[in-house]
Image (cartoon, helix red, strand yellow):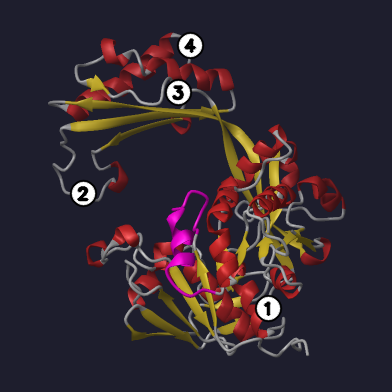
Amino acid sequence: MPNSPRTPRRDKVLVANGQGFWGDSILGPVRLVREGPLDYLTLDYLAEVTLSIMQKLRARDPKKGYATDFVKLVDRILPEMVEKNIRIVCNAGGVNPEACKDALMEVIARHGHSGIKVAVVEGDDILGNLDDLMASGEELRNMDTGEPLSTVRDQVTSANVYLGAFPIAEALDQGAQIVLTGRGTDPGLVLGPLIHEFGWGPEDLNELAAGTIAGHIVECGAQCTGGNYTDWQKIPNMAMVGYPVIEAHPDGSFAVTKHSGTGGLVNRDTVTHQLAYEMGDPSRYLTPDCIADFTSFNLTESGPDRVEVKGAVGIPATDTYKVSLSYHDGWKSVGQLTVSGPDALAKARLCSEIVWQRLAYDGFEYSEDERLVEFVGAGVCHAGMLPEGMDEAPEIVLRMGVKGSDRQKVDRFGSELVPLVTSGPPGVTGFAGGRPKATEIIGFWPALVKKDKIPTKVTVYDS
């Protein structure tokens, strides 16, 4: 008999996350598949700016707009994935999940496999529906400033809703072995398989909160197993750091661990470091599926590289989705020089003054808000916190930039850095990246939209 909605399919599920962002190590997911047992592999490729980049790629080529790295990964791990019956859940679909699915099907066919079901979750991309939504009363006000979207409507380049985990669970219920989504919550990639496996429903708030917390802990990959960790000297074999694995149970309890014999470290501190990542009110971590109370649960080290998490409390979700919008916000140009030798900082400061004076001579003035000067190596990353005298360095990287709405004015700045090599103080070398050119600034616009106005769609395809 098929499982009832509330009957767990099994008592323990292993879910690992092998990508924290588009550009994370390709070895993370490869090693997760190879080096230990696994039921689900999740992969998080998206960030707010990533979606805008993908929209640009799609505008140039209708077959683009997704994380191409994912297709290459599947090409590499498909035989082992099939052999071990590992299912994949990822947001590699970006703004073009259909194109990602088509590329994936070509890889599956090339390997000679058939019967692999690939699901596509749609509904997050509302760029084409913005005007209808606004006409229906959705003002999509900026959550930081309160301004309505109408003030920048003509400049919007992408608009994506953070969908929840239930459409992912629906795809898995239909037998999908690979689930492709666009924008959704990062923790939802892990929560979706747990909803599917354990039969959790919208009313199971504590369990949904537990799955959300598990997903948050592993969403940045190795950042909870020793990566980006304050006590980095204590992390063994960081070169072969193990990516995180969640061992979850139907009651919502779970353990954070990693494959045996891998590098890195899992303890209360490494997990706590990640728990504090991107956190607002810890008692109200908002998701489309529930509100998770991050102050409610306990962390217990139950063995080497193993932290148990129990006692999570959930609260009913709001009636809105968060929307990530991006818009054209002007132009910028940034370049850098390396200044070396005695008095490197003083020479770098002179270089910056020369640039502004030469531009002013030619009629190009920039306000303090429009220009940037940084002396990398003189404590710029910890300005005001270093002891006196710490700014003396044998070399300085001079980083300068401008921004504004006038592209010509921004572009003009780039022509004054290179001449400093021969018409500035001695020791100016290391000009990198060519002459800086004006590039588009992408602004971020967070907003809310009513859930009942955002339909979702799950389609399962057979290979």
Neighbor class of circle 3 (other Cα within 10 Å; few <14, some 14-19, many 20+) is: many
Which type of secondary structure does the marked residue at label 4 adopt?
loop
Q: Which residue is mark 1?
A: 196
Q: Which residue is mark 2?
A: 386
Neighbor class of circle 4 (other Cα within 10 Å; few <14, some 14-19, many 20+) is: few
Callout 2 amino acid: Leu
Magenta-colored segment: predominant secondary structure: loop
Callout 4 amino acid: Gly
Whether residue 57 is situated above or below residue 205 in the rendered picture:
above
Which residue is farthest front?
A: 112
Q: Is residue 22 magenta?
A: yes
Q: Which residue is mark 3?
A: 436
Please name which of the two marks, 2 or 4, marks the residue nearer to the observer: 2
| Residue sitting nearer the eye, 296 or 210 | 210
Q: CA distance from mark 3 to mark 2?
A: 31 Å
In the image, which disc is placed on residue 363? 4
Whether residue 269 is situated above or below residue 198 in the rendered picture:
above
Q: Evaluate whether residue 163 shows in this view.
A: yes
Q: Earlier in the sequence, mark 3 or mark 1?
A: 1
Q: CA distance from mark 3 to mark 1?
A: 50 Å
| Residue sitting nearer the eye, 260 or 45 | 260
Q: Quadrant of residue 354?
A: top left
In the image, which disc is placed on residue 310? none
Residue at the (56%, 74%) spot, across then down: 39
Q: Earlier in the sequence, mark 2 or mark 1?
A: 1
Coordinates of residue 384 in the picture (x, y in percent): 26, 47
| Residue sitting nearer the eye, 441 or 299 | 299
Residue at the (12%, 26%) spot, across then down: 342
Coordinates of residue 112 in the picture (x, y in percent): 66, 56
Which type of secondary structure does the marked residue at label 3 adopt?
loop
* Magenta region, residue range: 19-38
Q: Are marks 4 and 1 in contact (CB under 8 Å)?
A: no
